[in-house]
Image: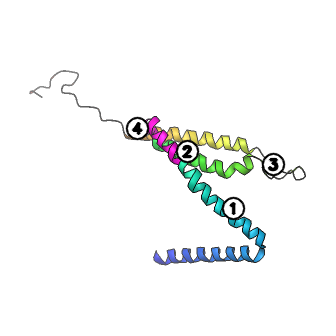
Amino acid sequence: MRATRAAVGALGVLAGAYGAWLLLSRQDLAQLTNAALWLASGVVLHDFVLAPVVLVVVAVVARVAPRHVQAPAVVALVVLGAVTLLAIPVLGRFGARPDNPTLLDRSYGTGWLVLAGITLAAVVAGALVVRSRHRPAVPPTERSPRGPRPGGG
């Protein structure tokens, strides 16, 4: 197991080094500056915009939603939030060009709506599973519906 992890780690380091070499050897200074700015912007947006928004939404869901819905709803919000952020370029059709109809050639909004529907169905299913697992036990009754048992019990 340890050797496998070391091999996978070594492959990851080699792939990263190869990617860094390609980036540094095939780009000019302006492109490298733009790539660094893009990467830094992603970190800043995540840490100062996305993470606080997610924490506020999770806190609201924790206060408003019933207990059996909270965990599935939070998972759905995180999934849809991440996918929506990644899909902003195609949902906004940024980069579409009239001279190349093969770019952004489908209805990405419809695809996002299908994903949102599947996610909502998964939340409902998850909430039902959580609810069924945490139902309170039926309190025992002192008498059966037929009356007392013979022998005093």
User: Foreground: 91 or 153?
Assistant: 91
The residue segment tinted magenta is: 54-69
Nearer to me, 18 or 118 = 18
Mark 1 vs mark 3: give the one in front. 1
Measured Cα–Cα span from mark 4 to mark 2: 22 Å
Q: Earlier in the sequence, mark 4 or mark 3?
A: 3
Q: CA distance from mark 2 to mark 3?
A: 28 Å
Q: Amino acid at mark 2?
A: Leu
For disc 2, the marked residue is: 77
The residue carrying mark 3 is 105
Real-space Cα distance between discs 1 and 4? 46 Å
Structural distance between the alpha carbons of marks 4 and 3: 44 Å
Residue drawn where x is 19% and y is 25% of the image: 143
Circle 1 SS class = helix
Q: Find residue 133 and report its image quarter.
A: top left
Relative to 3, 22 lies left or right: right
Three-letter amino acid code of the residue under disc 1: Trp
Q: CA distance from mark 1 to mark 3?
A: 26 Å
| Labels 1 and 3 touching (C-beta < 8 A) | no
Point out which mark residue 132 bears: 4
Q: Quadrant of residue 118?
A: top right
Does 110 sit left or right of 124 as displayed?
right
Residue 26 percent location from the top left of the image: 77, 75
The tag earlier along the polypeptide, 4 or 2, is 2
What amino acid type should be assigned to the residue bearing mark 4?
A: Ser
Lower position in the chain sequence, tag 1 or tag 3: 1
Query: Which kind of residue does numbered mark 3 sit on?
Result: Asp
Q: Nearer the viewer, mark 4 or mark 2?
A: 2
Graded by Cα atoms within 10 Å as few (under 14), some (14 to 19) or many (20 or more), the crowding at tag 3 reads few
